[in-house]
């Protein structure tokens, strides 16, 4: 047991024995340390002004990820190297990404700039990235700028972020790795007392025991949702259990039958594996939140919080994913769609937690499509999300799994439409009509700030039609606008 | 007024003016060392203030306010209500209708009813939730239609009228009419509203405020505290964005901070949570526009009747100027022989709409572009042809409010250059072919003009002061009444002062805007920051310089043309001094090396009462060509390509100007596409955070985004180094995106005018698409 949290900063190990259960990293920096370079823009992880970099060892490699410090708990920095905007310049010389932002006029009011600098810093250190505008705009989707219109910032990234790294972090990388290895112990963390604590068990058994003892505790994985309970809803959450240190819970196992995703595996960590299942699934992953959100947010969390507008559940349900849950009593597996009981209620017992998810691969006679519709293309929550898996034999649809988000209080299958589509001829649009009609009886969507009920219903039907057109090859020309985005960008680079 | 272009240009070799220097704070921005108000070191014992408000009430009488639980919260030092205000409970700019704290009525969703002063911001925010506010609700008036039905306004109606639009319409071969909804816009400055007040001796108060209008902060705080203006000092070094949202909307938070500081004797800080900020502060006005246009078969406009119904919110705020500017820009760049342009300033039970970059102009211009598109579509002509046909020219060059468009040639040249550069006609062919071959995806193209009037239409605001000191080491202290919100004003003014003294930029020290240095200023707004303040600073610098020149002439017995300030030197005949040496000579010679420069824009004669005179010193021009693709199954849209040409006269700093143009365009594009303000049926704003309110992000910018400065022969008016204002005009370049979307929708049914409303969200586009399909099926 360890009663402190430890992280690396400016080459030194920082050890804190006082960590609030809900204390955010941003509050630690600004209020405790008086380091005001990192800004609060929105307090909900949507603007990126508070972006800092966390360096961790991933399979022995030092990887820097951008995170939103406003909704990241201080305790979650444990074991990482923390880098903020104040840490980049060396001996009064600006870091290359800072210099490029000055030279190319990438700042105006300057308030978002520290966040951009830190995102650019992580891109500067990223491996396996290709020098395209699309790479850059993906990377920066979580950083909002209201002044510049982004062009000079993207140019600054293209100019500096794809060169061989040559900065103080590169020079001392070996030492950093050693220090991070030293920090990577396997002790349980518990800071505080029985009435209020920040804890991070290192094993599933430890979690089961602790959660059994404190079933009123809050489980936190990436914190991209729980963070808002703290900063926006001002909820009192005195007992916090962070899942991020549990050995093996972040596993991603790619096998011929499918992909097993541990519940604390982040979107970033699973992107490659899910893209292997379907290009559409990979593109959906890319459009979830932002780089910062994907670096912290977990697939398990997106499911466990039961949001009706979570982007992954409809796609995973259509793919026939199963969910694994565990408690002190034992473990069980259920079909993912059965987990969502109704709005705000999931099939999760007190003391029970999600351990993982299995996503089966498509068989040769199956086709999958998914579409996310939102007001803004990147870093937005969908107004309608549609996902479709059709099993086709001899030109007929023999089975289908159709799931939507944003159409009901939970992510939900369109069972009437599925039935109506059974036996339809794939390349004969006149046989799809019943399914289109059936959608009307499957859903009764709500109107809210994202879309009206009418638009949701119309779009749900359009997406089903689109999936069928694409899969059958009956589309009248190009019908997918998202594939046009960034297409030129890729070529241009 | 006849303009005599003074083509006698500046000194031949400019050393700092015209240079693409970085923003004055660029290195600090990227290092995290640029200090915003919340970053300032807090004096010991600083307290934090959080607003308390009724989270469900929209409009109704305040029945009771139970704050006992708030007061009992550990760490709470004080709770403020309207009864704690020693002076006047008002933070409005002019009309006296904006309570700092609610008195007996809740006027809109988000009105502040009380304020908590606590040891930490967290304690204050949590305690603020414990207030029990009982409101007797009444049915609120929410939309322009509601307000028209109830006949409620914040200000009297106003109109421009020329000729006889009734007769003109009757005489027209074709008449078109329609109505259009234009949404508002949240500023989404990245730095939210913030103020920090520290009590001083003798009832004094020092207020640091993120404001575009320090003088109004000073006056508001003095008014609320009931003390003389002279006891209050307001200061701002920089804002993390303003965009009009900190012109009047910063007042309330400065007043609350000062009130708390007066009550507790401690430094008090107010920093709004983002959601509170978005709920409580005013936004760009949303409009319903009823339009009617008469034209001939070529598309030439004969008469126009435009009615602008603006949702102003619960109070007048800046709605007078905003709505006047809508009317001033309801012509876009087009000559209306007969015109009636009417404006209603409607009172609704919503937050009080306010200044936003463009100040009503964008809405007026967008309505004009709708007229043109409607004419073109109904005649089966290309909209660009109809636009050019109706442009102001040598004969038809007087606006509906009587001001001549003297630079119509600049407008023509700029648009035709852009027409060529953007390959408009080639792409028009390509797009037609694309649309022929694609049933689901449709493309649209539009090239739209910008003509924006530069000056405050409230004449007295067109003045500015600057304070320049030359110290004996040769360093120069620069201060002026303009505020820095990212637009690069400080750097441009410093460049002008450096040029005047012939020194490098490092010799000019930029200092925070402060009401005790330069008093009685106007807001930094109306794009006029540089025009006004750089001129005032230039006058101040020139005065100091001329005193030194007189001294040197006397010492050296030479004429003033023998003295040259250049390259950090002062040359007197064949002798060379450093500026420090000359400054020391000045000091020992008892020369005053400080001057308060003052500038008032000449030639502005607008009289609102009689609807006559000249409201603008000059116009700034621009043009943009945008291409988009829409998905007619889902309403999704992407901007494929944008080409922009914009007129900044002779640029003071091309890098800064380019940044204003690009950023303004993207902000306008957000307003017209993804940025949607949604109120629920009860009148509660539902889009009050970036999770639900979507400003553009990096991937929304097209790969082909070509932005260039127009090759100007200089502003014909005698502005500072013949430059032109650039802050607001570029916002309206984004009208091209909206018109391109409209063009794409129009491709679905020939001769049918789409009913697209702004913002063109996927849902709005689908509504217009389905309407076209219905009409096509019905035809």
Image (spheres, rainbow, N blue to C red):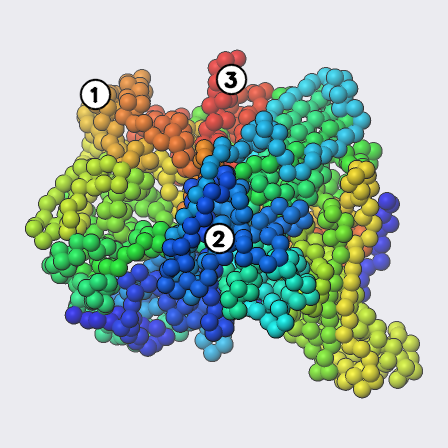
Q: What element carries label 1?
A: loop
The alpha-carbon separation of the residues under discs 1 and 2 comes to: 65 Å
Residue B398 or residue B443, whichever sits in front = B398
Q: Mark 1 points at which residue?
A: A423
Q: Which chain carries label 3?
A: B
Residue B531 visible (yes or no): yes
Q: Mark 3 points at which residue?
A: B775
Q: Position of residue A86 (x, y in %)?
A: 44, 70
Q: What element carries label 3?
A: helix
Q: Residue B114 carries which label?
A: 2
Q: Do labels 1 and 2 share a chain?
A: no
Tell me if residue B225 comes above or below residue B277 in the rendering: below
Query: Which numbered mark, 3 or 2, is in the foreground of this view?
Result: 2
Q: Which residue is drawn at 41% across and 48% down?
A: B132
Residue B649 visible (yes or no): no
Q: Which chain carries label 1?
A: A
Residue B58 or residue A65, whichever sits in front = B58
The alpha-carbon separation of the residues under discs 3 and 1 comes to: 35 Å
Label 1 crowd bin: few (<14), some (14–19), many (20+), radius 10 Å: some
Q: Where is residue A388 in the image (x, y as percent from the top left)?
A: 27, 33
Label 2 crowd bin: few (<14), some (14–19), many (20+), radius 10 Å: many
Q: Residue at x 39, y 64 (%)?
A: B75
The alpha-carbon separation of the residues under discs 3 and 2 comes to: 53 Å
- Whether the residues at callouts 1 and 2 have beta carbons within 8 Å, the answer is no
Q: Which residue is drawn at 23% across and 46% down?
A: A304
Q: Judge from the rendering whether residue B754 lies leftward or rightward of residue B230; answer left or right.
A: left
Q: Judge from the rendering whether residue B430 lies leftward or rightward of residue A163; answer left or right.
A: right
Q: Which residue is drawn at 79% across and 24% down?
A: B164
Q: Which of marks 3 and 2 is nearer the N terminus?
A: 2
């Amino acid at each position: 047991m360890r009663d402190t949290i430890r992280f690396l900063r400016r080459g030194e190990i920082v050890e804190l024995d006082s960590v609030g259960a809900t204390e955010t990293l941003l509050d630690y920096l600004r209020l405790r340390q008086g380091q005001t370079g990192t800004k609060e823009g929105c307090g909900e992880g949507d603007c990126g002004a508070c972006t800092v970099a966390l360096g961790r060892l991933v399979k022995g490699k030092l990887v820097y990820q951008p995170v939103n410090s406003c909704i990241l708990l201080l305790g979650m920095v444990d074991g990482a190297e923390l880098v903020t905007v104040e840490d980049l310049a060396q001996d009064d010389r600006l870091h290359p990404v800072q210099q490029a932002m000055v030279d190319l006029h990438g700042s105006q009011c300057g308030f978002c700039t520290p966040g951009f600098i830190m995102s650019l810093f992580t891109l500067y250190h990223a491996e396996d990235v290709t020098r395209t505008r699309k790479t850059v705009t993906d990377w920066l989707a979580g950083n909002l700028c209201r002044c510049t219109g982004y062009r000079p910032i993207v140019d600054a990234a293209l100019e500096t972020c794809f060169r061989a790294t040559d900065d103080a972090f590169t020079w001392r990388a070996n030492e950093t790795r050693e220090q991070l290895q030293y920090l990577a112990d396997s002790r349980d963390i518990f800071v505080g007392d029985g009435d209020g604590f920040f804890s991070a068990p290192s094993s599933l058994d430890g979690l089961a025991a602790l959660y059994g003892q404190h079933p009123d505790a809050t489980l936190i994985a990436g914190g991209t949702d729980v963070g808002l309970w703290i900063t926006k809803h001002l909820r009192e959450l005195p007992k916090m259990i962070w899942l991020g240190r549990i050995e093996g819970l972040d596993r991603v196992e790619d096998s011929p039958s499918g992909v097993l995703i541990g519940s604390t595996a982040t979107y970033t960590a699973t992107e490659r594996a899910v893209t292997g299942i379907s290009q559409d699934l990979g593109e959906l992953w890319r459009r979830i939140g932002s780089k910062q959100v994907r670096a912290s947010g977990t697939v398990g969390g997106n499911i466990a919080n039961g949001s009706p507008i979570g982007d992954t559940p409809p796609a995973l349900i259509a793919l026939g994913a199963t969910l694994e849950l565990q408690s002190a009593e034992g473990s069980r597996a259920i079909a993912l769609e059965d987990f969502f009981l109704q709005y705000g209620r999931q099939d999760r017992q007190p003391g029970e937690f999600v351990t993982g998810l299995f996503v089966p691969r498509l068989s040769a006679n199956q086709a999958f499509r998914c579409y996310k519709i939102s007001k803004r293309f990147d870093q937005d929550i969908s107004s309608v999300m549609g996902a479709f898996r059709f099993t086709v034999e001899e030109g007929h649809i023999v089975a289908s799994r159709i799931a939507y988000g944003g159409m009901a209080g939970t992510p939900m299958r369109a069972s009437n439409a599925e039935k109506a589509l059974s036996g339809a001829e794939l390349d004969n649009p006149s046989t799809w009509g019943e399914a289109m009609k059936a959608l009307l009886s499957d859903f009764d969507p709500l109107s809210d700030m994202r879309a009206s009920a009418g638009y949701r219903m119309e779009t749900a039907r359009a997406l089903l039609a689109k999936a069928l057109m694409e899969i059958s090859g009956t589309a009248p020309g190009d019908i997918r606008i998202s594939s046009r985005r960034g297409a030129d960008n890729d070529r241009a680079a | 007024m006849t303009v005599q272009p003074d083509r006698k240009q500046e000194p031949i070799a400019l050393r700092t003016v015209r240079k693409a220097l970085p923003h004055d704070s660029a290195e600090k921005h990227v290092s995290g060392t640029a200090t915003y108000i919340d970053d300032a070191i807090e004096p010991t014992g600083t307290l934090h203030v959080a607003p308390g408000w009724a989270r469900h009430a929209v409009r109704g009488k305040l029945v009771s306010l139970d704050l006992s639980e708030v007061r009992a919260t550990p760490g709470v030092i004080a709770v403020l209500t309207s009864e704690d205000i020693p002076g006047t409970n008002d933070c409005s700019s002019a009309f006296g209708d904006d309570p700092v704290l609610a008195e007996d009525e809740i006027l809109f969703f988000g009105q502040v009813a009380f304020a908590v002063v606590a040891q930490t911001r967290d304690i204050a925010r949590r305690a603020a939730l414990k207030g029990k506010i009982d409101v007797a609700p009444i049915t609120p008036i929410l939309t322009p239609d509601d307000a028209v039905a109830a006949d409620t306004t914040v200000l009297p109606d106003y109109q421009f009228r020329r000729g006889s639009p009734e007769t003109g319409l009757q005489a027209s071969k074709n008449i078109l009419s329609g109505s259009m909804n234009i949404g508002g816009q949240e500023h989404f400055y990245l730095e939210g509203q913030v103020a920090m007040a520290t009590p001083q001796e003798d009832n004094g108060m020092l207020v640091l405020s993120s404001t575009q209008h320090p003088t109004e902060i000073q006056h508001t705080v003095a008014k609320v505290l009931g003390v003389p203006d002279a006891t209050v000092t307001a200061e701002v070094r920089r804002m993390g964005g303003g965009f009009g949202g900190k012109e009047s909307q910063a007042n309330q938070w400065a007043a609350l901070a000062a009130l708390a500081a007066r009550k507790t004797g401690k430094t008090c800080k107010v920093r709004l949570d983002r959601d509170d900020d978005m709920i409580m502060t005013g936004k760009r006005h949303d409009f319903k526009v009823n339009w009617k246009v008469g034209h001939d078969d070529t598309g030439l406009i004969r008469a126009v009747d435009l009615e602008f119904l603006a949702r102003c919110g619960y109070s007048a705020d800046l709605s007078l100027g905003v709505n006047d500017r809508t009317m001033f820009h309801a012509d876009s760049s087009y000559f209306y022989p007969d015109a009636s342009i009417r404006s209603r300033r409607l009172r609704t039970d919503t937050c009080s709409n306010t200044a936003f970059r463009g100040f009503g102009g964008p809405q007026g211009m967008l309505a004009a572009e709708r007229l043109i598109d409607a004419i073109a579509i109904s005649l089966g002509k290309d909209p660009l042809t109809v636009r050019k046909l109706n442009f102001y020219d040598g004969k038809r060059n007087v606006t509906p409010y009587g001001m001549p468009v003297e630079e119509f040639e600049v407008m023509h040249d700029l648009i035709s250059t852009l027409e060529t550069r953007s390959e408009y006609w080639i792409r028009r062919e390509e797009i037609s072919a694309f649309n022929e071959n694609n049933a689901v995806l449709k493309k649209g193209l539009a090239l739209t003009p910008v003509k924006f009037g530069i000056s405050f239409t409230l004449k007295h605001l067109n003045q500015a002061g600057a304070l320049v000191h030359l110290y004996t080491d040769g360093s120069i202290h620069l201060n002026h009444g303009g505020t820095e919100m990212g637009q690069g004003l400080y750097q441009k003014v410093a460049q002008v002062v450096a040029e005047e003294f012939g020194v490098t930029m490092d010799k000019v020290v930029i200092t925070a805007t402060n009401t005790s240095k330069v008093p009685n200023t106007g807001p930094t707004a109306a794009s006029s920051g540089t025009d006004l303040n750089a001129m005032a600073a230039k006058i101040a610098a020139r005065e100091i310089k001329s005193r030194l020149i007189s001294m040197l002439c006397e010492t050296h017995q030479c004429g003033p043309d023998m003295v040259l300030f250049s390259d950090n030197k002062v040359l007197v005949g064949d002798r060379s001094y450093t500026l420090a040496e000359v400054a020391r000579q000045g000091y020992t010679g008892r020369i005053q090396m400080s001057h308060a420069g003052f500038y008032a824009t000449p030639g502005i004669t607008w009289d609102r009462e009689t609807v006559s005179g000249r409201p603008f010193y000059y116009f700034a021009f621009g043009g943009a060509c945008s291409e988009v693709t829409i998905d007619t199954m889902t309403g999704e849209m992407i901007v494929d390509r944008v080409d922009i040409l914009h007129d900044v006269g002779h640029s003071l700093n091309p890098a800064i100007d380019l940044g204003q143009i690009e950023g303004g365009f993207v902000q306008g594009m957000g307003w017209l596409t993804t940025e949607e303000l949604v109120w629920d049926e009860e009148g509660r704003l539902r889009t009050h955070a970036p999770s639900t309110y979507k400003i553009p992000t990096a991937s929304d910018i097209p790969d082909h985004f070509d932005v260039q400065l127009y090759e100007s022969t200089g502003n014909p008016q005698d502005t500072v180094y013949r430059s032109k204002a650039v802050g607001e005009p570029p916002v309206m370049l984004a009208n091209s995106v909206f018109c391109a979307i409209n063009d794409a929708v129009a491709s679905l049914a020939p001769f049918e005018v789409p009913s697209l409303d702004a913002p063109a969200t996927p849902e709005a586009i689908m509504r217009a698409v389905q309407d076209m399909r219905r009409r096509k099926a019905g035809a």
